[in-house]
Image (spheres, helix red, strand yellow):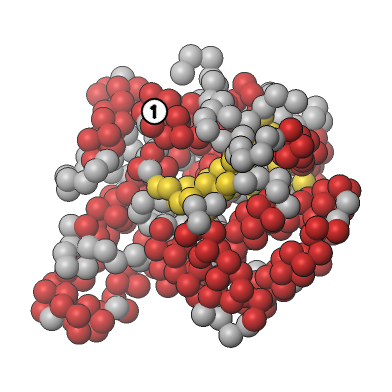
Amino acid sequence: MAGSPASLSGQDVGSFAYLTIKDRIPQILTKAIDTLHRHKNEFFEKHGEKGTEAEKKAISLLSKLRNELQTDKPIIPFVEKFVDTDIWNQYLEYQQSLINENDGKPRWFYSPWLFVECYMYRRIHEAIIQSPPIDDFDVFKESKEQNFFESQESLIALCTHLQELRTTIEDLDENQLKDEFFKLLQISLWGNKCDLSLSGGETSSQRTNIINSVEELKPFILVNDMEHLWSLLNNCKKTREKASVTRVDVVLDNSGFELVTDLVLADFLLCSQLATEIHFYGKTIPWFVSDTTVHDFNWLIEQMKGSNHKWMSKCGADWENSIKMGRWVYHDHIFWTLPHEFCVMSQVAPDLYAELQKAHLILFKGDLNYRKLTGDRKWACTIPFRQALRGFHPAPLCSVRTLKAEVQVGLQPGQAEQLAASEPNWMTTGKYGIFQFDGPL
Ligand code: F6P
Ligand code: MG
């Protein structure tokens, strides 16, 4: 789009994009291959020889993919028919059209990082769907489940906190309610540290009680628009007519620990009456290792319900009920696993854009959503968030994200320089976080 800076890309040797494509993505592919290999017996028991053949086929397709990446081969079109194949291949052509020198082709280290990284996950999916009967296998499922189990202690503390809060919520005054809202927002923010793509699919769970860390972590919030979120929702609560709706939409990120923090926040929003309906958006295919699919969402609630911890199991049961009653609604849409920046959503996925327009507030969880909100471009750190959104305003929105990519806008003059002086990698370690709001103030 005219007037926008260039995209982050692997062309910039030494950048985080470069290191991701060079090191972390091959590592994730190797881990996926290894996972398939380890499930060999299971495939055989389930499907006989056909299962073994399918496992071999998927492994050979993934090995080929890893080789294409490591030798910086051209990005090739998708061949297997799937709901989004045509859109993807059109996007590849569009990327091709941007390269006019010597009939160059989009390549791993040359093309925009956002595009090639999304492409990689979509190719993993292609390798799996080309290998029936194991075509519904999620190569990342084990890691997601492990993250959930390893975070048990912290999750129990969180569920206990929520259940205690629920018993006293009626007695809280406005300030106390606001404090609780801020606390649960921050827990959901720091829950975003626990994604598995940054760690190359290795474990990244929450082992300590997050509730105790919230105060200490406050200085690491670089943009803090929590007050705007409070005013918006508290105002909705006060002015809402009987039987009318305040809807908060949450564009989910990672399953496991982070998802529980999001669901705890959602539960609080309803029981505090700051909202009356919560809509969640997940991914239709396994994505960026730990992103939430409908299977992960249902699996996690089921696990919690079956937990032998009283409060965890109560959370699971309550949440299942919220879904049954339609106060929680889960959606998925192929747009979330396309490579497009959100500013083109109204053209590429007008139905999804229209759905989001029904929200009073949209929370975008995580780093990848931020990259798509801002187009993953080399913006100056001080340009306003609104400018980087380039017309994407379905409803008031807020990014709740820990920084794991070299894009950040809306900082104060000098803020980025100061951080860089003491910590050169401040943008990519997940140590810092933001609540960045866009909407009428
Ligand atoms: O591969 C690394 C990375 O792509 C980050 O740079 C990225 O945006 C992140 O993975 C996923 O993070 P999140 O789960 O917060 O979206
Ligand atoms: Mg993620």
* Residue 231 shows up from this direction: yes
Residue positioned 56% across, 81% down in the render: 307
Q: Position of residue 201 (x, y in %)?
A: 48, 64
Image height of 412 relative to 168, above or below: above
Count of marks overlaid on the render: 1
Q: Residues within 10 Å of mark 1 (few under 14, many from 20)?
A: few
Which image quarter: residue 118?
A: top left
Q: Which residue is mark 1?
A: 350
Q: Residue furthest front?
A: 242
Q: Residue furthest left?
A: 49
Beta carbon of the mark 1 residue lies under 8 A of ligand 1: no
Which image quarter: residue 63?
A: bottom left
* Residue 409 shows up from this direction: no
Residue positioned 80% across, 27% down in the render: 413
**Nearer the observer, 63 or 131:** 131
Q: Position of residue 308 (x, y in %)?
A: 58, 85
**Nearer the observer, 290 or 364:** 364
Residue positioned 88% across, 51% down in the render: 173
Q: Is residue 213 left or right of residue 430?
A: right
